[in-house]
Image: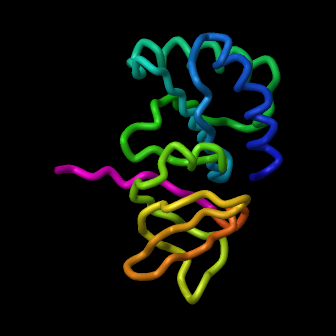
Amino acid sequence: MSAKVRKLEEMLAPVIEGLGFVFWGIEYLAQGKHSTVRVYIDHTDGVTVDDCEQVSRQVSGVLDVEDPIGTHYTLEVSSPGMDRPLFRLDQYHDFIGSRLSVRLSAPFEGRRKYEGILRAVEGEDICLVVGEYELQLPFESIESARIVPVFE
């Protein structure tokens, strides 16, 4: 996690949680002179468009005052959705048995992308069953991970 993302999390999580939402995570996408800050919120009753608007207003105010980005940016507030991204190791525990799409920061056994079933979280590693193999992946090597929704 970059220092900028860590700073944004520290700044925005208390604001979001103070509004009664779960701070799920944040993505910071630097694109030259214009960046995107994508904030994910959750709630036990689900997240509505009005919820996203309310959080966006509050977060925007904090970002305007603190100015941690320093360049032009677009703020997006969203629910994590069915294909929710996983940002922290503690989030994986709730999705044991789910199908994940995982992208690693460096190749492991010649590949950076894996899709499989999350079997367990052991210490700082996740156990991912890919076909007939079980991979032990260190959390720190995961660049991104998302739930793969199953439609039946």
Compared to residue 149, the image places residue 24 above or below, namely above
Q: Residue at x 39, y 18 (%)?
A: 48
Name the side, left or right, on which 93 lies relative to 130.
Answer: right
Q: Looking at the image, which residue sits at the far bottom?
A: 110
- Magenta-highlighted residues: 143-152
In the current view of this chain or complex, which residue is farthest to the left? 152
Which of 32/78 is in front? Answer: 78
Taking 149 as reference, is 130 left or right? Answer: right
Residue nearer the viewer, 145 or 2: 145
x and y, in percent, of residue 123 in the image: 72, 59
Q: Nearer the viewer, residue 92 or 104?
A: 92
Expressed as whole percent of the image width and height from the top left, the position of residue 90 reads: 65, 44
Residue 139 drawn above or below residue 67: below
Q: Residue at x 61, y 57 (%)?
A: 121
Task: Look at 37% across and 55% down and name the residue there.
Answer: 148
- Count of marks placed on residues: 0
| Left-right relation of 88 to 151 | right
x, y percentage for residue 9?
Answer: 73, 34
Task: Between residue 5 and residue 100, name the one nearer to us.
Answer: 100
20 up-or-down from 109: above or below:
above
147 sits to left or right of 139 = left
The colour scheme used here is rainbow
State the residue at coordinates (58%, 88%): 109
Instruction: Decide whether residue 108 is among the magenta residues.
Output: no
